[in-house]
Amino acid sequence: MTSAPKANSEKPAPKSLEQSEYKDTVNLPQTDFSMRANAIIKEPEIQKFWQEQSIYENLSQNNQGDIFTLHDGPPYANGTLHMGHALGKSLKDIINRYQLLRGRKARYVLGWDCHGLPIELKVLQNIKAEERANLTPLQLRKRAKEFAMQTIGEQAAMFKRLGVWGDYENAYYTLKPEYEAAQISVFGKMALKGYIYRGLRPVYWSPSSHTALAEAELEYPENHISRSIYVAFPVTKSSEKLKAIANLPNLHAVIWTTTPWTIPANLGISANPSLDYSIVSAGEKNYIVATELVEKLAVTFEQALEVKYTFKGDVLEGAIAKHPIADRPSPIVLGEHVTAESGTGLVHTAPNHGHDDFIVGKKYNLGMISLVDDRGIFNADAGEDLVGLSVLKEGNTKVVEILTANGTLIKEEAYNHKYPYDWRTKKPVIVRATEQWFASVDGFRGDALRSIKEVKWIPAIGENRITSMVQERSDWCISRQRTWGVPIPVFYDEETNEPLLTEETVAHIQALIGEYGSDVWWEREVEELLPEAYRNNGHKYRKGTDTMDVWFDSGSSWAGVLGGENHDSKLVPYAVNYPADMYLEGSDQHRGWFQSSLLTSVATNGYAPYKTVLTHGFALDEKGQKMSKSLGNIVDPTVVINGGKDQKKEPPYGADVIRLWAASVDYTGDVQIGKTILAQMSDMSRKIRNTARFLLSNLFDFDPAQDTVTYDQLPESDRYILHRLAEVTKDVTEAYDNFQFSRFFQTIQNFCTVDLSNFYLDIAKDRLYISSPNAPRRRSCQTVLMYCLEAITKAIAPVLSHTAEDIWQHLPYPVSQKSVFQAGWFTAHDEWYKPELAGKWEYLREVRSEVNKVLELARNGKAIGAPLEAKVLLVVSDDSQRSYLASCGDELRYLFIVSQAEIVDNLPTDLQFTGASTGLQIAVLNADGEKCPRCWNYSTHIGESAEHPHICDRCVGALAGTF
């Protein structure tokens, strides 16, 4: 684009000394802005410049606009970063940089989640068994902290290489004493409001991790197969209502379960009072099942089931069945949770192993029976046949064997369904009743649902997702049986086991942790941890061993980083917003960080900690598959930036290509990335870069202070492009304002490629190269180039940040700002917007497109070698369209890049290369005259100048300074 025009296919004219000197009078482009990004070298240099000049720090503190806070969701300090991290961090940085360009104080404090099981397991896995057995809690915590801090350093370096601006020096880690203290404060406020309680109730329990789990710590992999069984419980006593309807022998209540191992803990059978039930004969036995399931069960049992009696479920209340294994009754009770969607319509009820079972059991005083230990192993109370067996393995098998042997098993079949797994160990969990600490969501559910409606959700469906999750959420189990975490600051009376949790005890522990860190809980004796008033009050206390759920850790970040209501956090050196302007993470965080943050903030302060929540999907490979090592389809952001071992196959694209990819995709759903997509992004980045290079190279002698042409002096083509620039600026601004980055991408791509490269810059070359340096036609074009260059540079700066800075550093004219980010957002002048002018020029561009088709025919037919060898004839039937073309005058040939263009009434009949479209006829002939060696246009005026007999009249004028 920046090279001089190539010679056509004609035999070159004989050169004289005078002719050869004309090339030195052409205004050829000049710039040292490289065509290649050379990102692997250039990007770190630009990042060093930003750092040395403190660009982010100065803008985030000294911009004149309001504070803008995008609160960072903490990535887990465990392992290397993946494309999901790169996507999320790129989107955050794009938003922050745009806010800085708009003059706001965009303050971004990066954060890391540091506690919890994965880090603890990493530490334990890396030491020998003997050492592991002797490891004290404090030793384990020290190693876990070291591991977390090392990982944070590695991840932070990668975020910086991606070009992510933020406060790294004051980044928040959930292991910092001041953060932990803020978290204890949140816990204490919730406890004092009555939202925290300790109770024995079923929780998700991970036998592989030996700890309780929250719902957010579960995943549901595809194709889990459970052993499902149908079991007949002999009815030993009918209810009074049932006796009045039927009194049949061999009556059995039939249940279905996908967890055979829970049968030993059965304490009842639940029926729905509103469902229809039937007694059906099955050979010698009679079964009680839901009426609407009779036909399906007959197929499953492979036997005829004849309906004898039908009645409502409430008839069954008070009937008693016999436990199929243990010597105890199993009463039939009523529960609204029972459905006829699957199974038999009767639900085996083990209060220790089911959330609904627990509620029903409590209502009917069924009691609790604990037969399973922390490892998921049957204990001695389960009996000699089961003790020591894993409930998920041999225990399950043994229960089925016992039921088969005593004749109560009707049917067993494999059942494919969603089953919860520990998202860290990737192993199945169980539901098990244990003493845990809970947050009573019921206490503030209404406020949480109201707060959700006050938040802007992007995409809007996010509101529905989190609303349904909060509506259906059970109480939040916040305690964990781990060492590496923030302690739940509770003491227990040695005699009564009653918890000691008061405003004084929480405040005292909060102050100690704020000063010494949470290690103090393990370092000091109980007497040193208790406030003075509780040290000699006649009670002896022990400290609790539970730590907090890591979702409570990260869910307290609004208090630890944003400073809560008082903005009093020590983590940041300046005030930030609470509620934050935005939270941005993956869509899985509706059940994770978004929700835990919402619950803690609403419980303590009554409103959400964010004003806007934006979510993105998962990064998949180019086939839409999840990335995994086993499939070999992982796209490593480090390799994308720096290149792989074989850089021909894995070239170093740099950070800007990843950032452009993040901006180009529809992030509201899952997004794809791979070699082909990266190559496309690199190509698009290169096109934008080369457009900028052309603009830079043709402004080498332009001084805006002296050479800018006022709008009223610009020719129509220039004013039209400024109209397009005004439209583009408006579209890009709206795209950023609405976080529609793919719209920005399409708009800039189209403007650079279609409006500039393929049209305006193509027809501008004659004005730029051939005119005298100070000619109005050249300076007006340069004026437009300047506006376009600055607008494009600022428009791409949030996304292609390194490229934009590189362009800014190569501006050939003086600017007062060191960095493009100090220059502010580009604003189009109101006078540029001319829709009426656009209509005319859109038509002219259509005509140009049609003319190019005929020129191509002429080239293919060897009639011409280049468009400048051509003369174009046009016949226009529509008067207004003819007027458009006629008003262009001699400029029409520049529009087509030919030597001559004429509007005629009729085309000669003997022409070879013609074309037509609606209301238009086109013909291409050989141009009249001779070829000018300076401008390569054909002219009939060559030789008219005595001083310059070899060149055309235009070039004579250019050398004289008049053209």
Image: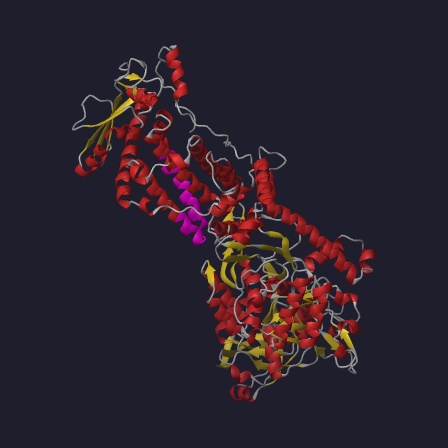
Q: Position of residue 460 (x, y in %)?
A: 44, 60
Percent position (x, y) of residue 337? 54, 75
Q: Can residue 226 be seen by looking at this rendering?
A: no
Query: Of residues 696 and 360, which is closer to you in this image?
Result: 696
> Compared with residue 433, is residue 636 higher up or lower down, i.e. above or below?
above
Q: In the image, which residues are magenta?
A: 731-760
Q: Residue at x 52, y 89 (%)?
A: 244
Q: Is residue 796 left or right of residue 182?
A: left
> Which quadrant holds the C terminus?
top left
Can you give x and y, in whole percent of width and height, for residue 945 in the image? 28, 15
Q: Residue at x 53, y 53 (%)?
A: 62
Give the number of callouts: 0
x and y, in percent, of residue 406 in the image: 68, 73
Which quadrant of the view contains residue 227? Answer: bottom right
Q: Quadrant of residue 706?
A: top left
> 404 and 760: which one is in front?
760
Image quarter (top left, top right, bottom left or bottom right) of the N terminus: top left
Residue 27 or residue 763, whichever sits in front: 27
